[in-house]
Image: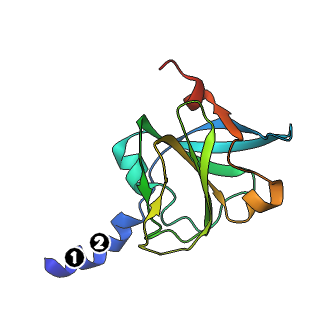
Amino acid sequence: MALFFLVALPALAEEEMRFDKEPLLIQTAAGKMLHFTVEVAATGDQRARGLMFRKSMADDAGMIFDFGQTRRVAMWMENTILPLDMLFADDTGTIRHIKENAKPYSRDIIDSMSPVKYVVELNAGIVTKLGIKPGDRIVSATTTKAK
């Protein structure tokens, strides 16, 4: 019986979780409108899973984590295969902090550095490639829903 659980556990860990998708815009201070399609992690289980175990992601894809309230957030990359850029945004969608090139499989804590309501994860390198900076704003159905 114990052997079954040892064999089944990795399969369960990689079991697919379903996420809704929505368009997300990043409005830069320079006036650019950057278009992405993101999956929405709004429940505790979805936020805990995030992009773990994903082996690839389109250049214009990502995930938005909605924490439901503004607070300081800590993330990590354990079981995350893809290197990521993380955008930490407040309740207005304004990006307050960016962590570029978060290392796959790392258990190091990635701190939002200030209270935020949302975290957007994109493929590593997108922030530099597109010139995304703190002060830019994310806009999506999640960030504009009634508060």
Instruction: Name the residue beneath numbered marker 1.
Output: 4
1 or 53: which is nearer to us?
A: 53
What amino acid type should be assigned to the residue bearing mark 2? Ala
139 or 35: which is nearer to us?
A: 139
Residue 124 appears in the figure: yes
Tell me the SS state at disc 1: helix
Estimate the x, y position of residue 20 in percent, counting from the top left: 54, 38
From this viewpoint, which residue is outermost toward the right? 31
Estimate the x, y position of residue 53 in percent, counting from the top left: 49, 67
Q: Is residue 99 left or right of residue 78?
A: right
Estimate the x, y position of residue 89 in percent, counting from the top left: 57, 42
From this viewpoint, which residue is outermost toward the left? 1
58 or 139: which is nearer to us?
A: 139
Q: Is residue 88 left or right of residue 46?
A: right
Tell me the SS state at disc 2: helix
Marks 1,2: beta carbons within 8 A: yes
Q: Say which residue appears at 82% left-offset and 54% top-offset.
A: 130
Crowd tier of the residue under label 1, counting other residues whose Cα lies within 10 Å: few below 14, some 14–19, many 20 or above: few
Q: Say which residue appears at 29% left-offset and 72% top-offset.
A: 8
Q: Say which residue appears at 54% left-offset and 22% top-offset.
A: 145
Residue 28: mark in rendering = none
Q: Marks 1/2: CA distance?
A: 6 Å
Instruction: Name the residue beneath numbered marker 2.
Output: 8
In this rendering, the answer to whether 21 lies above or below 106 is: above
What amino acid type should be assigned to the residue bearing mark 1? Phe
